[in-house]
Amino acid sequence: MNAAGLKYRLVPSIFLMLASCAPIQAATEATLPTPTQTKISPSQTLPVLSTSTSTATPLPPTITSVPCDPLTADFCIIDGNFILQRPILPPANASVDISYRYGTTAKQARDPHHGVEFMSKFGTPVHAAGDGEVVFAGLDEIAIYSPWRIFYGNVVVIRHANELYTLYAHLSRIDVFAGQQVMAGEKLGEIGQTGAAIGSHLHFEVRRGGDGTDYFSTENPERWLIPKEGTGALSITLVTAREMKFERDIVISSDERLPIYVFTYTKGFEHNVEDAVITDLPAGIYKIAFYEMGVMYERQVEVRAGQLTETLFVAGQ
């Protein structure tokens, strides 16, 4: 994808970006909020106001800030669409496993990951990430939500507003049924290791569009989960000459903390505009560094608590 093509897609609106198989009528729910920008970086010139020829005293002009453009700014800070709570609640481990993030392969050791993992002991309660309707609850004996039978094992899928779906896999126990209305925080079942699971954990996915069965309709859950108190999220987009996504190392560092090593999305995740999202970053200033075709790229960005920082790199610039 070239820079011009991506620029078209990177308008501010991008930041908003199973027992029964019978169709179920969707519940009426509120529309997802539209992210609002809270920072312009760098500062940009306000539009020139026209000169009035009236002899009357003119009203003071309304000042409207120019939207932050990630193609020209080092970074933009927006509210984000943090509308999903953690499916695992404290005191259990409510943190995303950093060794096998969305869109990565754990250094080519595993299949490309369509969700994130929450590592907790067998029997840990699993909760709904938001209000919605259960559209599937049971063993995936038929390959509906993935290309393979019994891949997710015991799985629950919830439909939320605006064709947003969440999927909870490898459960040892299911406490809900298809057609049931659930509220955010309601118990759905318990962590297990059914299906293609290695050890007990929760595999959690976010999907958008259609009926939620498209295996390649996933979004990075770290873009949707509410950050922990005092932390924010960082989204990194790379525009290069490559036709497909390419897994590469990125180092995120600050003066106060040890460096964080992450991977960008691998091949097969071209439907995602961004190349990496990291949540639960303590508020502060960070430096991003990576190599692309033998050239090092570096940039400083700011992360604010409860908000999403968007940064875009264009190779060759």
Image (cartoon, rainbow, N blue to C red):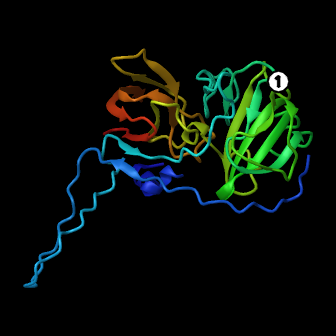
Asked whether, in this view, residue 193 is left or right of residue 71, the answer is right
Question: Horizontally, is 260 left or right of 189 in the view?
Answer: left
Q: Is residue 80 visible?
A: yes
Q: Callout 1: helix, strand or loop? A: loop
Q: In this view of the protein, which residue sits in the foreground, 228 or 138?
A: 228
Q: Residue furthest left?
A: 55
Q: Residue furthest top?
A: 258
- The residue at 17%/66% (across/down) is 48
Q: Is 101 situated left or right of 127 in this image?
A: left
Q: In percent of the image, x 77 and y 29: which residue is there?
A: 125
Picture coordinates of residue 16 (x, y %)?
A: 52, 52
Rendering coords of residue 200 (x, y %): 78, 20
- Please give the name of the residue rendered at 50% of the width and 27% of the height, measured from the top-left corner: 248
Residue 102 versus residue 163 in the image, above or below: above
Along the line of sight, which residue is nearer the eye, 251 or 33?
Answer: 33
Q: Categorize mark 1 by other alpha carbons within 10 Å: few (<14), some (14-19), many (20+).
A: many
Determine the residue positioned at 10% across, 78% down.
57
Quarter of the image holding residue 316?
Answer: top left
- How many callouts does the rendering have? 1
Q: Is residue 286 above or below residue 75?
A: above
Tell me which corner region of the image, top left, top right, bottom left or bottom right, holds residue 155: top right
User: Which x, y percent locates residue 187?
Assistant: 78, 37
Q: Nearer the viewer, residue 138 or 190?
A: 190
Quarter of the image where the C terminus is located:
top left
Check disc 1 and give the amino acid type.
Gln
Q: Give residue 301's position: percent from left, percent from top.
A: 34, 33
**Residue that carries the numbered disc 1 in the rendered image:** 193
Q: Is residue 18 visible?
A: no
Question: Can you say whether 259 is above or below 223 in the image?
Answer: above
